[in-house]
Amino acid sequence: AKSLGRNNFQIYAPSADLSQQQHVALKAKLRHAERNGELRVFYQPQVDTLTEDIVGMEALVRWEHPELGTISPAFFIPLAEASGLIVSIGEWVMRTACAQAHVWEKMFGLHLRLGVNLSAVQLMQPNLVATVANALTDTGLDPSCLELEVTESISVKTVPHLVESLDALHAMGCRIAIDDFGTGAASLDYLRRLPADRIKIDQSFVRNIGVDPDDEAIVRATIDMAHRLKRGVVAEGVEIEQHLNFLRANGCDELQGYLFCRPLPTAAFEKLLAERQRL
Ligand code: C2E
Ligand code: CA
Ligand code: CA
Ligand code: CA
């Protein structure tokens, strides 16, 4: 694979080593993080499996804590969900990323697809569809460039209007992706009920390519099933050539992972697009 450049960011992931008290304090700080400009959106490229061209990117939020350094979303997103802060943080991520994608579209003349994660709490908001529509109108990004990633851990039972909301967003022209595919209890039901344009094969399967023949069989069958249903497939967590070769041989459409590039800050991603443009 062509290397898209290496960046090693230290991700501080406080978890077991935090006391209950520190946990509460961090939650309070998160409330001000957005206002204080401590949140950043990073972008990770998604590449075409055959050409390795960058065809899109996933927006991934980071918290640059003044004392603790970069805090992983795997840690603070659950905090933000529990406190409801995810609604404003999620909207901020969406607006920031849509505006940035529109800038890059004009700058490079590329019709890049932007993946934005939606949490269950956001999907429960009655005004979600209007929020997304406003973000697109205000930033000028074409709806077809925006791909909303809905994780399989969100259940149709706990989010009452999930199907209706996603249908409305899809009708607006946005794309829908099922994130972490294969890890939930309702993968096939999801595929049947949601207006999904594509699925993202979870990294736990990709990691076992070359290790576990059962997981390889699942990856292969997932790609085949998606294509029979006329959906696209992107594999996450592609870290080594062996993953790439297997996914290429089995017709996976797009790839995302450290083999190509880690999530990058805005300026670094822009530099990458500029370099690729000159090739
Ligand atoms: P996700 O949506 O499944 O995002 C993919 C995660 O895998 C990212 O972790 C990404 O950095 C990581 N990753 C990418 N390539 C590789 C690889 O080759 N190997 C390995 N081991 N990991 C790889 P990150 O950025 O730490 O985000 C973790 C999770 O936090 C995301 O998982 C998503 O569920 C959540 N998240 C991140 N940003 C947002 C956001 O803006 N809104 C919401 N609601 N959730 C977010
Ligand atoms: Ca995702
Ligand atoms: Ca995922
Ligand atoms: Ca995940």
Image (cartoon, helix red, strand yellow):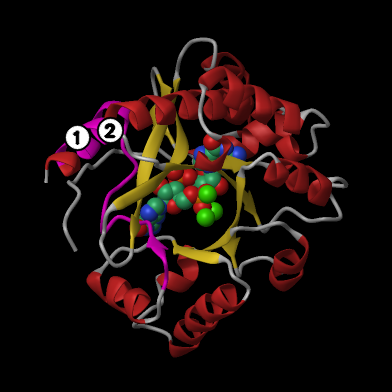
The residue singled out by tag 1 in the image is 274
Image location of residue 41, percent across then percent down: 43, 30
Of 6 and 138, nearer the camera is 138
Q: What amino acid does circle 2 point to? A: Phe
What residue lies at 76% left-to-right and 48% top-to-bottom? 167
Q: Quadrant of residue 117?
A: top right
Q: Is residue 110 magenta?
A: no
Q: Please tell me how crowded label 2 is: few (under 14), some (14-19), or many (20+) other residues with Cα within 10 Å.
A: few
What residue lies at 78% left-to-right and 56% top-to-bottom? 155
Q: Can see residue 16?
A: no
Q: Quadrant of residue 208?
A: bottom left
The magenta-colored residue range is: 252-275
Image location of residue 29, percent across then percent down: 56, 18
- Compared with residue 51, is residue 88 higher up or lower down, i.e. above or below? above
Of 264 and 96, nearer the camera is 96
Label 1, label 2: how many angstroms apart (C-alpha)?
8 Å
Q: Please tell me how crowded label 1 is: few (under 14), some (14-19), or many (20+) other residues with Cα within 10 Å.
A: some
* Count of numbered badges drawn on the protein: 2
Furthest-top residue in this view:
36
Labelled disc at residue 203: none
- Horizontal side of 202 relative to 132 (left or right) equals left
What residue lies at 57% left-to-right and 34% top-to-bottom? 19
The residue singled out by tag 2 in the image is 108
Q: What amino acid does circle 1 point to? A: Ala
> Would you say the residues marked 1 and 2 are in contact, meaning their CB atoms lie under 8 Å apart?
yes
Of 89 and 28, nearer the camera is 89
- Horizontal side of 86 relative to 278 (left or right) equals right
- Compared with residue 258, is residue 75 higher up or lower down, i.e. above or below? above
Closer to the observer: label 1 or label 2? 2
